[in-house]
Amino acid sequence: MNNKWSAGILTIGMALMYQTVSAYDPETLNLLKQNITAWNAKPPATPGHAIDLSRAPLENADLSTACLVKANLNGAFMKGAKLRDANIQGANLRWSVMEKADLSRANMANTNLFEATLENANLKGTNLKDATFIEQANLSGTTLSNNTILPSGERATSRWCTMHNAKFVSEPESALPTGNTSPSIEHASPYTSGTPTTEITDTGNNKLQTAHPDSNFEEASLDNANMENANLINANFHKADLKSARMHGANLQGANLDRAFLKGADLSNTNLSNTNLFGAVLNGANLSGANLEGASLFNADLDGARLDGANLKGANIMDANFNNATLSSLTILPSGEHATAQWSVMKQAIFVTP
């Protein structure tokens, strides 16, 4: 076996590994669902540990006025939930289901809405300023008003709603919504899932799991995880959270990264040949020197990614977004030819000289 790949160790908390393991704490969930006043008075978050409610069952729950600042609600099921005047600022709402939820006047500023389902939800008067990935969210039938604040900071308009298959209603103009605020939660680090970073990345006494080929990390929360030089051939990272993950030199040949969230990840010098990166988010990722030969990048988002020296020979880049991505003459295009300034301009990318 090639020592270059076998030397890699991936360490993560067992509670974060598989989608069959609930990441949320049942007692924390019960407090939220049963007593919002007690929840807001004594929030369970501590410095460096955001509230973890990933994949929590919150269907039809009444969470009005709840303080959920920077909470991890990744994949939470909140269909029909009431979140009126709730403060969800900075929360991770990736892949969460909020169909028919009432989010009127909620503070959703700086939230991550990647592939969130907001179909037929009520967003009248909701503050969405600086929310990210709203273009990837499902807003079909969602109701917004002139008091809804868009990610741009502007008020929602009928035209914007029509472009996003949403509904627009007019109502008396009100002030910018702010939501309920709790200082003890506001300073918690986002999306840490309750597990200290040292337990995720330490390869010493805190080692919890060894990476190996065919590992299953489907929908796992692996933000900031250390996977440098790991052997992850054919591993399954379908819809996994890998924001800012360190994967330098890892062997991911044939891996499934379908719709994985890899914003800001370090994938430099990785072997990504024949990987499935369909719809993957690679904004700002470092793919310098990566081998992407034969990879599927269909509909992948490479906005701002580094691709200098990357090998894309035979890769499927149909509908991939290369806006502001960095390429150089050392970058190999799907055709097998070296990247040029002209090709970069066509893709709205940036061409640099090595």
Image (tube, rainbow, N blue to C red):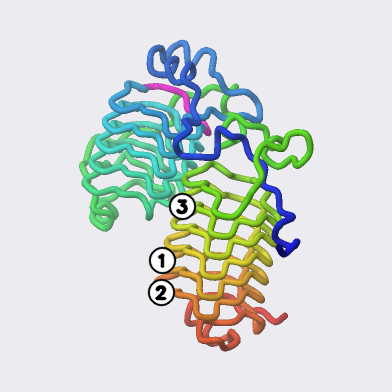
Q: The residue under label 3 is which amino acid type? A: His
Foreground disc of the pair 1, 3: 3
Residue 291, located in which quarter of the rendered image?
A: bottom right
Residues tagged 3 and 2 counted as in contact (Cβ below 8 A): no
Closest to the observer, 212 or 59:
212
- Above or below, comparing residue 179 to residue 261 in the picture: above
Residues tagged 2 and 1 counted as in contact (Cβ below 8 A): yes
Disc 2 is placed on an element classified as loop
Disc 1 is placed on an element classified as loop
- Residue 211 is situated, as x and y percent measured from the top left of the image, at 64, 48
Residues tagged 1 and 3 counted as in contact (Cβ below 8 A): no
Residue most extreme to the front:
1
Q: Which residue is mark 3?
A: 238
- Predominant SS along the magenta part: loop
Q: Quick one: label 1, few (<14), some, or many (20+) residues within 10 Å?
A: some
Quote the CA–CA distance across marks 1 and 3: 15 Å
Residue 204, located in which quarter of the rendered image?
A: top right
Q: Which residue is mark 2?
A: 318
- Magenta span: 64-70
- Above or below, comparing residue 291 to residue 23 in the picture: below
Q: Which residue is mark 1?
A: 299
Q: Residue at x 48, y 33 (%)?
A: 21
